[in-house]
Amino acid sequence: MIAPAVSLRGLTKVYGTVRAADGIDLDIPAGSFYGVVGPNGAGKTTTLSMATGLLTPDAGTVHILGIDLWRSPAEAKPLLGVLPDGLRTFDRLTGAELISYAGRLRGLQPGIIEARRDDLVEALDLASASRTLVMDYSAGMSKKIALACALVHAPRVLVLDEPFEAVDPVSATAIRRILGDFVGGGGTVVMSSHVMALVERLCDHVAVVAGGKILTSGPIDDVRGDTELEERFVQLVGDDREHRDLSWLRPS
């Protein structure tokens, strides 16, 4: 039996009185393109941070392809490529230097780093900016260079928090192609997003998160049923906020 790419059991994180993750149980099949959706403050980023070793859970376990992440991090972490939310980079390096540095941190040989760096720079349309300091990158370019750093060591599982945010349409097409090829080659992508149409377009599985809990998860066709994913999302999460009368906005 093939182990799930990511398996979470009882994953919990509490901040004061807020349970940002409340006993999360989730299995993400190997070879899937898995979307994680939820409203702001739902616990998506907290859960993904714990699932990738960036945040210590208060309780629960994480297994990456059958390896306990917190008991055997040296074995599990090389399997992961991570694009976290609000990533801080060494922004006084050039783009090419930052990718090379990421490769060195992963223990790759210089020749391999150079070849992969050049491939990634071209694939992500960063060639013209590869000698520019990262501090001078736009938000979209920073997102792409961070993705390149997550890919350089050829991980088996990619965990991406809002990978298309601030990315222009041409670059988004290139990223979709790269991620599609990655999954087609047997890799697993886990992607959080607020854009339901994007999740429907790319993902074959989805989990809906709210209040630190998984409301539903599974193949995307099963989750959305005979409706659009956005409609199903609103049904699950609810929209019980007061709808104020803003008639004063209408032209007189």
Image (cartoon, rainbow, N blue to C red):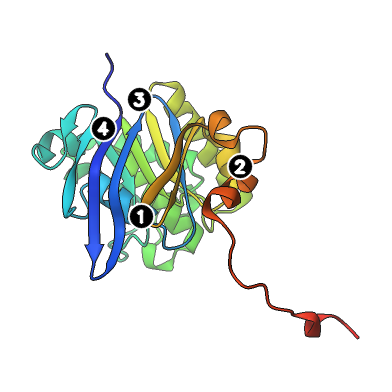
First-in-chain label (2 vs 4): 4
Say the numbered circle drawn on residue 120: none
User: Callout 1, which amino acid?
Assistant: Gly
User: Callout 3, which amino acid?
Assistant: Ala
Of circles 1 and 4, the one toward us is 1
Q: Quarter of the image for the C terminus: give it.
A: bottom right
Of circles 4 and 3, the one toward us is 3
The residue under the point 31% across, 63% down is: 88
First-in-chain label (4 vs 3): 3
Say the numbered circle drawn on residue 229: 2
First-in-chain label (2 vs 3): 3
Name the residue beneath numbered marker 1: 212
Name the residue beneath numbered marker 4: 112
* Quarter of the view holding residue 148: top left
The foreground one among 139 and 216 is: 216
* Quarter of the view holding residue 223: top right
Residue placed furthest toward the left: 71
User: Callout 4, which amino acid?
Assistant: Ile
Of circles 2 and 4, the one toward us is 2
| Residue neighbourhood size for the residue with mark 2, other residues' Cα within 10 Å, grouped as few (<14), some (14–19), many (≥20) | some
Say the numbered circle drawn on residue 30: 3
Q: Indicate the position of residue 213 as horizontal and vertical percent values.
A: 37, 50
Classify residue 133 as left or right of residue 58: right
Residue 32 visible? The answer is yes
Q: Indicate the position of residue 6 as horizontal and vertical percent values.
A: 29, 34
Report helix, strand or loop for mark 3: loop
Of circles 2 and 3, the one toward us is 2
First-in-chain label (2 vs 1): 1
| CB contact under 8 Å: marks 3 and 1 | no
Report helix, strand or loop for mark 1: loop
The foreground one among 6 and 123 is: 6
| CB contact under 8 Å: marks 1 and 4 | no
